[in-house]
Image: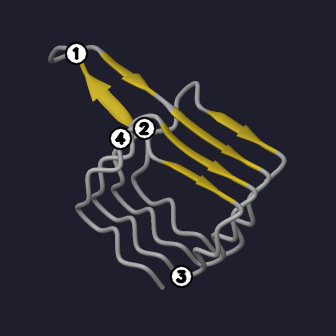
Amino acid sequence: GCHFDVADLRDASFQQCQLAMANFSNANCYGIELRACDLKGANFSRTNFAHQVSNRMYFCSAFISGCNLSYANMERVCLEKCELFEN
């Protein structure tokens, strides 16, 4: 799979992509868009979907819809108020 670990993927857009077994660990994915992608077995551990505004305030943003997330690793991921439909 592809290696996006520690990459800056802010506001990146992936549509109908084959990303099975991709590694997104520790990547900055605030505002990422993943639509109709094959993410089977993808590693999202410790991926950052948040924008830290202050010590106590942050905003999360991600749009993940119509994706295959079977066996995906979402360990230590914050997806508050993110769009997660039809996965």
N-term-proximal mark, 3 vs 4: 4
- Mark 4 residue element: loop
Q: Are marks 1 and 2 in contact (CB under 8 Å)?
A: no
Q: Which residue is mark 1?
A: 53
Q: Picture quarter containing residue 85?
A: top right
Q: Tag 1, which secondary structure?
A: loop
Q: Nearer the viewer, mark 3 or mark 4?
A: 4
Q: Are discs 1 and 3 less than 8 Å apart at CB?
A: no
What's the distance in space between the residues labelled 1 and 2, CA to CA? 17 Å
Please name which of the two marks, 1 or 4, marks the residue nearer to the observer: 4
Which residue is the site of mark 4? 10
Measure the alpha-carbon separation of dots 1 and 3: 32 Å
In the picture of the structure, the residue carrying the numbered disc 2 is 11
Q: Which residue is mark 3?
A: 21
Mark 1 to mark 4 CA distance (whole Å): 15 Å
> What colour scheme governs how the chains and residues are painted in the rendered image of this protein?
secondary structure
How many numbered discs, if any?
A: 4
- Give the CA separation, mark 3 to mark 4: 20 Å
Is disc 2 placed on a helix, strand or loop? loop
- Judge from the rendering whether residue 45 lies leftward or rightward of residue 64; answer left or right: left
Of labels 1 and 4, earlier in sequence is 4
Image quarter (top left, top right, bottom left or bottom right) of the C terminus = bottom right
What percent of the width, then of the height, locates residue 66? 80, 52
Q: Specify the amino acid type for callout 4.
A: Arg
Disc nearer the start of the sequence (2/3): 2
Label 1: how many residues lie within 10 Å, few (<14), some (14-19) or many (20+)? few
Q: In percent of the image, x 23 and y 62: which residue is there?
A: 6
Residue 56 drawn at (x, y percent): 22, 15
Question: Could you tell me the amino acid type at mark 1?
Answer: Val
Q: How far is disc 4 from disc 2 in space, using C-alphas?
A: 4 Å
Q: Residue furthest left?
A: 55
